[in-house]
Image (cartoon, helix red, strand yellow):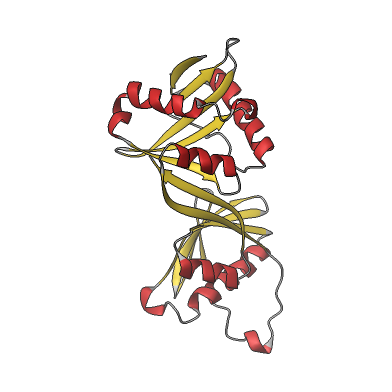
Amino acid sequence: MKIKMLELPRPEELSPLISLARLCREYDESFLSFPEEPELCWVLTDENGHPVSCTALCQTGEETFECWAFTHPEHRRKGYFSMLLEEMCREGGALEEAELCLLADARVESARKAAEGIGAEPAGSEHLMEAALKPEKETEAQTGAWIPLTFLPEAQGFTVRAAAGSCRLSIQGTSACLYELEILKELRGKGHGTAFIRSLKQELYRLGVRLLRLQVSGDNLPALSLYEKTGFRITETLLYYLY
């Protein structure tokens, strides 16, 4: 076995790592894929030079990195992930004082155990949610629930504004992602968030969007309640561990 570090890896260096990640994703039925532009990778290869375990790091702060880890299903429970981490901490330069945020799919028990096995501390979760968009007929009970929205075009979507707040949207084909929803503090808890999202869903449907996605922290209970009330469901949960 041999360990090597790849700094700003080239496409031909990334290709076998992406294939390893795809194999792990299919085996575990996980949604985590290899990051598109990692800054650093550590790779453990077998005697034939094939990767059996790898980590990919993306810097998110001055001394913080997000870390993806993938180990071939046939080579798990052999301590290879720990070997890579030890090498990263020993040879990684700036990583010696850095904080690693390990990402794991909540549904994959082996990933959770691997993070806990190296002494990483749970640091929260992120839910991926989605809602199918359908036309809604305004009923007497819903009268007054619709609010006017202003769509301001951006490079890949819109900023959406209303009297009660705003959000951002990224649109690709018939799907859209919702970001940075913000309801004015003095108007929260009065139904304005519900009206904003219901109106947004209808406007997006008129634009041809059929699926709306978003991410929300597992600790943000008011937002979770709002999204569930307006037709979103949790599809995936991402766990964070600090090492």
Tell me if residue 193 comes above or below residue 39 in the rendering.
below
Residue 201 higher or lower than 137, as above or below: above
Which residue is more in the foreground, 34 or 98?
98
Given residues 118 and 3, the one toward you in this image is 118
Residue shown at the point (58%, 69%) measured from the top left: 228
- Residue 31 pos. (x, y %): 62, 43
| In the foreground, 35 or 82 | 82
- Picture layout, residue 242 above or below residue 216: above
Q: Position of residue 58 (x, y in %)?
A: 42, 35
Give the side of residue 131 with respect to residue 192, left or right. right
Q: Residue furthest bottom?
A: 140
- On the rendered structure, is 94 left or right of 31? left
* Residue at x 62%, y 59% (from the top left corner): 130
Kindly tell me whether residue 161 is visible in this rendering.
Answer: no
Residue drawn at (50%, 74%) of the image: 193
Question: Can residue 117 be seen at all in this image of the molecule?
Answer: yes
User: In this rendering, is residue 37 above or below 105?
Assistant: above
The percent position of residue 96, horizontal first and vertical second, equals 30, 29
Residue located 46% across and 23% down the image: 42
- Quadrant location, the C terminus: top left
User: Nearest the camera: 97 or 144?
Assistant: 97
Residue located farthest toward the top when viewing the structure as drawn: 48
